[in-house]
Image: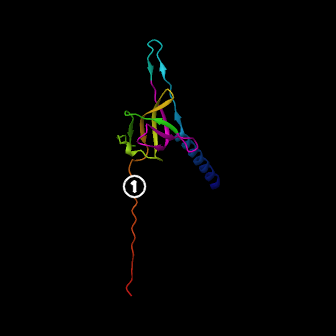
């Protein structure tokens, strides 16, 4: 009886882990619609979640990977691109670094993907590791 319950719990945990992995790697795409009466187009935003792979401040793009087994994709940014921390506060470009998980909101313009907003999923704080050594001597 206990062994059957354990097997069921392990199977449920494995199914949850697979579903969670697929949810993080999921890319949501929406389409641009055109009103035939007015000819106006509605720009829609696409969302992708993954990890920043490279960022060079002097360039006009950032590379991003949605899963570890996919090739990085180049996303272009401009002066209107905003970067937010997990709480929704605006942060500077210095918060961007490789291997940082993030969600990108972008639009496709021609053959380029233009980033409108980057939401970091980890706090943009640096952690400093301090090490100390204590030596104890005993008198002779």
- Residue at 45% x, 14% y: name it: 39
Question: Closer to the camera, 2 or 11?
Answer: 11
Quarter of the image where one finds residue 61: top left
- Residue at 37% x, 85% y: name it: 139
Relative horizontal placement of residue 58, taking residue 26 as reference (left or right): left
Residue 25 place in picture, x, y as percent? 54, 40
Relative horizontal placement of residue 14, taking residue 123 as reference (left or right): right
Question: Closer to the camera, 109 or 60?
Answer: 60
The magenta stretch is 43-72
Residue 36 place in picture, x, y as percent? 48, 13
- Residue at 50% x, 37% y: name it: 74
Element under label 1? loop
Of all residues, the one furthest to the front in this rendering is: 58
Quadrant position of the N terminus in the picture: bottom right
* Residue 11 within the magenta-colored segment of the rendering: no
Question: Closer to the camera, 68 or 57?
Answer: 57
Residue 109 place in picture, x, y as percent? 47, 27
Q: Is residue 60 above or below residue 31?
A: below
Of all residues, the one furthest to the top in this rendering is: 37
Residue 115 place in picture, x, y as percent? 44, 34
Q: Which residue is mark 1?
A: 127
Q: Would you call the spot at circle 1 few (<14 residues within 10 Å), some (14-19), or many (20 or more)?
A: few
Please tell me how many numbered marks the rendered image carries.
1
Q: Is residue 36 above or below residue 3?
A: above
Quadrant position of the C terminus in the picture: bottom left
Question: Closer to the camera, 114 or 122?
Answer: 114
Look at the image and name its color scheme. rainbow
* Residue 45 within the magenta-colored segment of the rendering: yes
């Amino acid at each position: 009886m206990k062994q059957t319950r354990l097997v069921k719990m392990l199977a449920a945990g494995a199914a949850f882990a697979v579903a969670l992995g697929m949810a993080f790697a999921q890319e949501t795409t929406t389409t641009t619609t055109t009103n035939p009466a007015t000819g106006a187009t509605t720009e829609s935003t696409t969302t992708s979640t993954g990890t920043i792979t490279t960022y060079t401040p002097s360039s006009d793009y950032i590379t991003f990977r949605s899963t570890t087994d996919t090739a990085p994709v180049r996303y272009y940014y401009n002066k209107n691109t905003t970067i937010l921390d997990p709480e929704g506060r605006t942060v500077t470009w210095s918060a961007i670094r490789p291997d940082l998980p993030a969600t990108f909101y972008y639009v496709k313009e021609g053959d380029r993907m233009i980033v409108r907003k980057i939401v970091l999923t980890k706090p943009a704080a640096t952690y400093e590791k301090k090490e100390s050594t204590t030596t104890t001597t005993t008198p002779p």
